[in-house]
Image (cartoon, grey):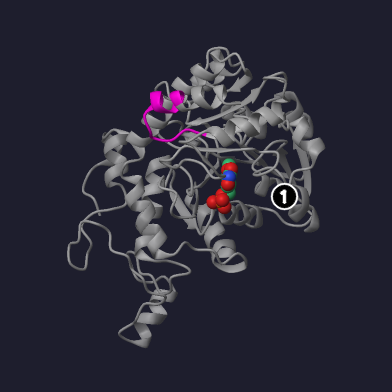
Amino acid sequence: MSKIDLKKVDFETLIVHAGQGADPAYGALATPIYQTSTFCFETVEEGADKFANKVPGYHPVYSRSGNPTTRAFELKCAAMEGGEDCVATASGMGAVGSVMLAFLKQGDHIIFDNSVYGGTDYVASHDLPDLGIEVSRVDTGDLEAVKAAIKPNTKIIYFETPNNPMMKVTDVAAIKAIAGSDIRVVVDATFAPPPVQHVLALGADIVLHSITKYINGHGDALGGIVVGKAEDITRIRKHCMTKINGCPPSPFNSYLVLRGMKTLAIRMKKHCDNAMAIAEYLEKNPYVKTVYYPGLKSNPQHELASRQMENGMYGGMISFELKDDVKGLSSFEAGKKLLNHLTIPAIAVSLGDPDTLIEHPASMTHAGVSPEERLAAGITDGLIRLSVGLENAQDLINDFEQAFAAI
Ligand code: LCS
């Protein structure tokens, strides 16, 4: 383990070293991939003691409940978020599902933001009600509506900030003040991981991420994490992640994420700088009706975003909508042409990759959300979502220029 006092160093240093150090076996600097399903005991007594947690230190017994490569990844993520502990999962949805099953039972109530990732929306609209869990959908940007939705059986308030795909920012501290100590505030911060924001410090009880996105950052592994108080994380790990969900990440994927996270600080800065340049370009473009990016001064949530997000960074995600009369085409038809003419962005879902990705939420990430719910959340058929990559910003702008010209 690293000897550095992580409390005394900047995030740029912390993210390189946290959770890692010379490996105890041979001193390897890069954390080895412990590609094993099980771990041997010298004696029956040692096995029994390890299962009974009577052995000090980290002592994995079976890779579903613990693996040294995955543990290094978890410890790095706990340090990244400033939380007591972390549990890693095989995907972001594994993290979402494990939190739900750990803290909700039949008859409980959860307040969900009215606009979340399509997969999470399915959990709120179908899976939880099927289990006898009451779900209220409210706009968590409307604090009075959140207050009014609270019931005696409310256990969780759940939202993404910024949210997928509208970039709506929810005031974490204000929601926690409404929730009080009995209701857990669970925040999906996938769209803006540290160092862009630290939602536990703002008052969230639990933060989760799809690390498939920025945290791994290379578009080559799925994964999820949940960070919070040690007691909560133990409950999620023991009762859900390792049991009913059974969804640990593979040691190889944990290794990939550890590798990717070494550059998280510099990658996020570049994603944010590029996104700001492109949002400003799109805002001035005569064919664009609206740009959704909290970094823009014209964004109605810019002041809140500036309080909640750090060091002038607002994330690398932008959504925008074209005007309805672009060369005689509807916003949707013009948008399709624009995407088909771009040469640098890949037409693909997911986000947070080095490559710029562009997609159409209504037919892709949010196709499973009902048209009424989509419209209520602002997801029109003409909305386009852009995950700004690490390429040169001017190259991306030039590509947009030629694609707009070709519509
Ligand atoms: N939370 C958010 C905010 C997400 O955007 C996603 C996936 C998940 C959770 C689930 O994570 P996964 O299981 O995929 O690791 N979002 C996707 C998207 O916008 N395009 O493709 C996947």
Please state if 302 lies on the left or on the right of 354 as rendered.
Answer: right
**In the figure, is residue 183 to the left or right of 238?**
right
Q: Position of residue 267 (x, y in %)?
A: 36, 36
Taking the image as shown, residue 406 lies to the left or right of residue 113, namely: left
Determine the image quadrant of residue 385.
top right
Q: Is residue 311 visible?
A: yes
Question: At 65% from the left edge and 23% from the top edge, which residue is drawn?
Answer: 322
Was residue 332 drawn as part of the magenta stretch in this picture?
Answer: no
Of 395 and 152, nearer the camera is: 395
Circle 1: residue type: Tyr
**Is residue 145 positioned above or below 130 on the image?**
above
Magenta segment, which residues?
A: 387-398
Residue 119 spot, x, y in % from top left: 66, 49
Q: Is residue 288 above or below residue 159?
A: above
Report if residue 293 is visible in the image. no
Quarter the N terminus occupies:
bottom left
Q: Quadrant of the C terminus?
A: top right
Q: Residue at x 28, y 53 (%)?
A: 20
What residue is disc 1 on? 122
Residue at 60% x, 51% y: name it. Answer: 96
Q: In this view of the protein, which residue sits in the foreground, 241 or 33? A: 33
Q: Position of residue 59 (x, y in %)?
A: 35, 69
